[in-house]
Amino acid sequence: MHTLSGLHPDQAIAATLDPTEFLGMAPFLRMSIAGEEFTQFAQDLIVQVQQHPDNAILWMNLATVMQCLEDTETALEIQRQALSMQRVYTYPAKQQPAKLRLLMLMVPGELSVNVPLDCLLENSDIELIYYFITSQTPFEAPIPEHDLLMTGISATTENQALLHELEKITSQWPVPVINSPEHVQKSERLAASALLQNKPGLTIAQAHPVTREALSLVVSEQANLPGCDFPVILRPAGSHGGHGLEKITHRDELASYLERVQVNSYFLSRFIDYSNEDGQFRKYRLSLIDGVAYGCHMAISSNWMVHYVNASMYQDPQKRAEEARFFNEFAQFSARHQQALQAIYETTQLDYLGIDCGETPEGDLLVFEIDPAMVVHAMDSEEMFPHKQIHMNKVKNACRDLLLSRAFTHQNQADDGL
């Protein structure tokens, strides 16, 4: 998580938080975007944990704060301590009484491995119940009462076995399941890049699994790149958020990369130049909710690897003005790529999905990644981003409507004896 220091003078978000309540990710993301420091809050929380070592909620909140401070090793150790005491954490609806209770299956790990739905529903009338499971102990704790179940687990390589295990269990679940495990598996990078090949209006570079040994043979000119030629995109298998992701243009760069990024397995794909005539790269984040696409943000950068926080979106008013046009003209964008978006929905059958994409020079939707666990939020300053709230409210309302409609339909069928 990135701190954008100096964006806002208000440093009082932490003062409004009650650390004895399960806080989820949302307030810390809000603090990060507002440029508020975490250090003092973390120190205060450490004192409270020392005073109340049996309070699992304090431990879990501290684990999240430590991840925000990028001390991942410590954060995961603290998280293990929390989960050894308690597997279920409730994020109460801010608007009471709650309209429904959503049970979310989650896994231990970094923030990126679970769906951060609280970032969209932080002030809603929906109660989120986080239920942490592992392959060894899938349902160790009693299951709380709930109206819907959601697979809140990202389809990382490490999670595939667990998701497969959950298929049979959730197929007999007594309430509707949002993002069933069998469909979540289709969003894994390797699976998605294969499933979405040759879809009309859609381009995606197929990911090729490759070993370190095979790449070393390429460096020594004893073999060629499997499946594509330079330039290529290379990343450690299972990585997310651009970690270890680089563009490689020749053998010398590949040799240097293997020295710096030493793992056993990688994903290799061809590099697709999606720059516009002005030389800038434009990346879009979309939400696909119940088959309908919504714009979440647009970032513009001279670097092919675009991240919103390092694309000068906060510093450049011209870029923000172009993002505003993207939002205001999103109906045209969506119509232009309707075939591709429909193909993604029909192929994955996911109720809730994030899409990172661009556009090829030929006009296709260029898909970089699909993942239900992408961070989607409406926390940017209205003063700096006056165009965002009205459009992000559409995303929040669509998410809420999806959940309420599924629960309502299920209740009606139960009342009718179906």
Image: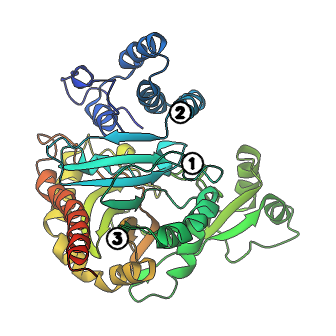
- For label 2, the residue is 79
Q: Residue at x 55, y 71 (%)?
A: 168
- For label 1, the residue is 243
Residue type at mark 3? Asp
Label 1, label 2: how far apart the Cα atoms are:
22 Å
Q: Residue at x 44, y 26 (%)?
A: 62
For residue 259, above or below residue 59: below
Q: Nearer the viewer, residue 186 or 3?
A: 186
Q: Residues within 10 Å of mark 2 (few under 14, many from 20)?
A: many
Describe residue 365's horizontal placement relative to residue 264 as left or right.
left
* Numbered circle sitting on residue 55: none
Secondary structure under tag 1 reads loop
- Tell which circle, 1 or 2, labels the residue nearer the N-terminal end: 2
Secondary structure under tag 2 reads helix
The answer to whether residue 132 shows anywhere in this view is yes
Label 1, label 3: how far apart the Cα atoms are:
27 Å
For residue 298, above or below residue 364: above
Secondary structure under tag 3 reads loop
Q: Residues within 10 Å of mark 1 (few under 14, many from 20)?
A: few
- Front tag of 1 and 3: 3
- For label 3, the residue is 351
Q: Quadrant of the C terminus?
A: bottom left
Label 2, label 3: how far apart the Cα atoms are:
29 Å
The answer to whether residue 270 shows anywhere in this view is no
Residue type at mark 2? Gln
